[in-house]
Image (tube, grey):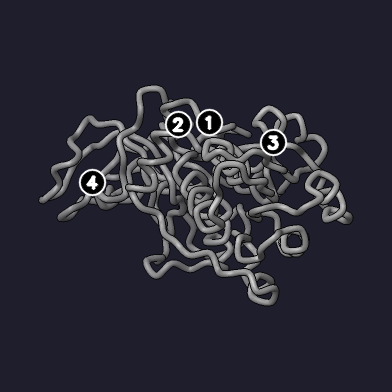
Amino acid sequence: MTMRAMAFTEYGGPDVLRLMDLDVPEPGPGQVRVRVRAAGVMPFDTGVRQGAIRPPAAAFPVVPGNEFAGTVDAVGPEVTAFAPGADVLGFSLLGAYAQYVVVGADQLVTKPDAMDFVSAGGFSGNAQGAHMALSAVGVRPGDTVLVNGAAGGFGTLAVQLARAWGAATVIGTASPRNHDHLRALGAVPVTYGEGLEDRVRALAPGGVDAAVDAAGAQALRASVAVAKDRHRVATMLADEEAERLGVPPLRGTRTAERLAEVTALYAKGLLRVHLRATYPLQEAAAAHHAVESGHGRGKVVLTVD
């Protein structure tokens, strides 16, 4: 049996992605096969396609995609938590840009009825990343939190999660056209770029309690400058600059427990996925172009027929 998948056989730009017919994977012990309905598109995926990120399991043809939602199609031996017909969302390193993906049962959670498949497909990666980063910087009730790159897929969820955890003020950096989006999330918007430090200090004269960065080295430097404690600063991107500045490396991993926690917050209405665009599976190259263009608002998701 074969399935349709978007894959590549050489590293390069978005146009190396091709629609291919590949064998449907079989679940082994402890594994679950999911009929994918939607798959999120993340910078991690574009890094894999470029060859900048090379997971150990990557072998041509490589099928990108590390977050997805769908319906359980088959289970391997020793799986008791899921049965065929269950709607789920989950995560992997590769393989989600396809009609079927096989993952461990410990990489899935049940999809809430209130969560549509497109939102679920674009939730797992950024929601867990936001949870990981905000946990690392120890966001507490009453804190003032700075989120750099606040309008993107990660930032949008980081703003919401900080508010859900009781932050008194969330300052979000974004281009001016996305400021209304941030206000709607409950953040105070500021424009990133030159002078960011001064603009943040005007809003938080005593400094910010915690900061997370998804914008890069320049924003990270500004974050350190305005933070009361650089040990409560984390970056998703600028690891080398973080080491130079004495910012602790971001540690943590995606788990079903972490995903279950943020999914429960979604079910309570405290988190939402804000969609930037959806593309059919066969237009994954266009979706990668969109993600790599930067300055986008919300999440890009592939739909899988």
Between the C-alphas of marks 4 and 1, the distance is 26 Å
Residue placed farthest to the top in the image? 114
Measured as percent of width and height from the top left, residue 47 is found at 57, 61
Q: Label 3 to label 2, Cα distance in Å?
A: 18 Å
Q: Which comes before the other along the chain, label 4 or label 1?
A: 4
Residue bearing the label numbered 4: 32
| Quadrant of image for the N terminus | top left
Disc 1 element:
loop
Q: Which mark is residue 43?
A: none
Drawn side of residue 298 relative to residue 110, left or right: right
Residue 202 visible in image: yes
Looking at the rendering, in which quadrant would you find the C terminus?
A: top left
Q: Secondary structure at mark 2?
A: helix
State yes or no: discs 4 and 3 in contact (Cβ < 8 Å). Answer: no
Q: Residue at x 40, y 54 (%)?
A: 254
Mark 4 lies on a secondary structure that is strand
Identified at 41% across, 47% down, the residue is: 96
Task: Give the residue at mark 3.
Answer: 187
Disc 4 + disc 1, Cβ < 8 Å:
no
Quarter occupied by residue 187: top right
Which residue is the site of mark 1?
A: 272
Q: Position of residue 66 (x, y in %)?
A: 44, 51
Nearer to us of marks 3 and 2 is 3
Please tell me how crowded label 3 is: few (under 14), some (14-19), or many (20+) other residues with Cα within 10 Å: many
Q: Label 4 sits on what residue type?
A: Val
